Amino acid sequence: MKVDFHTHFIPQQFPDMGEKYGGEGWPTLLQAGPCQADIYHAGKHYRRIDDRSWDPERRLKDMDAEGIDVQVLSPIPVTFAYRFSAQAVLELAQLQNDAIANATSVAPTRFIGLGTVPLQVPDLAAAEVRRAVTSLGLAGVEIGTQVEGKNLDDPALEPFWRTCVEVGAAVFVHPAVMSGLLDRHPTLRLCFAHGGGTFPWLLPRLDQTWRAFDDVKAVTANRPSETAKLLSYDTLTYDLMNMRLLIDRLGAERLIMGSDYPFPLREVPPGAVIDALDGLSHKERADMLGRNALRFLGREVLF
């Protein structure tokens, strides 16, 4: 089974939040034809997209053509909009979450959804992740790496993290070093995009920092390289050497295939680097291509 964990979705009928609530720089979607649209972010053109971004039937055709059994649908990060009014962003998040839930309902065994939340107000974010998981049936949420200058281990975010643990929400982070967070919430499920960015490469230096400074040890009882093996990472690195390093440092059991469908930087076909790796056992390859994703999302029933 092949599961593409890293794909993005946006509803075709995306609201003009600036017109309704005021303020400049809201993400907007302008139709450019029956099957195309342009995303604008902070007043500038972000990218041209097509109906693969919103049409589940089109996605299913592409999945069948590329041998993908399941796609995980998550919002486009520029739509997080953390700097705007929390109530307005909650409305936008709910609209997107409802749309993702509707898309997954087209083919419940082929699509799994991740939502978004107004993370700038943790209580609202907590309420929305609860609704997304318990009412809409989404597997969790996708979030950014910072919230208006606050790192994800900021104590103010504790209500959100507690609720994620309570409802069993998977959290996809589009990477950050989570100092102390997993000490407080050891069952929290976190997956970092793009192979964790520079994080895996910096682990030896981070371990040395932990060993050298008592104030760092006071924040987290575990070496960064130990904490790193409690997290998950998508495999969107495009490179065999990078993938081998991820496997050596983190373990094949922590790696989840993702392609960045339907954007230009996507890996084609999904899982190409995993398929090209030598020296993997059948189990390791099958786990990275699909089973790890389903375990992370709490959807083991699909395999």
Image (cartoon, rainbow, N blue to C red):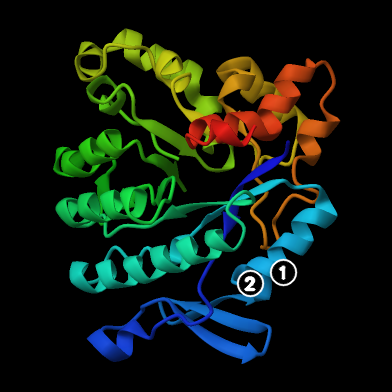
Q: In which quarter of the image is the C terminus?
A: top right
Q: Evaluate whether residue 22 shows in this view.
A: no
Q: Position of residue 104 (x, y in %)?
A: 54, 59
- Which mark, by number, is residue 58? 1
Residue at the image point whose x is 64% and y is 15% from the top: 248
Residue at image position (37%, 71%) is 95
Instruction: Tell which of 301 and 275 is nearer to you.
Output: 301
- Mark 2 Cα within 10 Å, few/some/many (few <14, many 20+)? some
Residue 24 seen in render:
yes
Q: Position of residue 235 (x, y in %)?
A: 64, 36
Which residue is pictured at 53% across the width and 79% down the height?
12
Counting from the top left corner in percent of width and height, residue 162 is at 21, 36
Circles 1 and 2: CB distance less than 8 Å? Answer: yes
Residue type, label 1: Arg
Label 1 residue SS? helix
* Res 275 → quadrant: top right
Picture quadrant where residue 97 is located = bottom left
Q: For label 1, count other residues whose C-alpha is less than 10 Å away and answer few (under 14), some (14-19) or many (20+).
A: few
Q: Quadrant of residue 282?
A: top right
Label 2, on which residue? 55
Q: Residue 140 carries which label?
A: none
Label 1, label 2: how far apart the Cα atoms are = 5 Å
Q: What residue type is labelled 2?
A: Asp
Q: Which residue lies furthest to the top in this view?
A: 211
Front-most of 17 and 241? 17
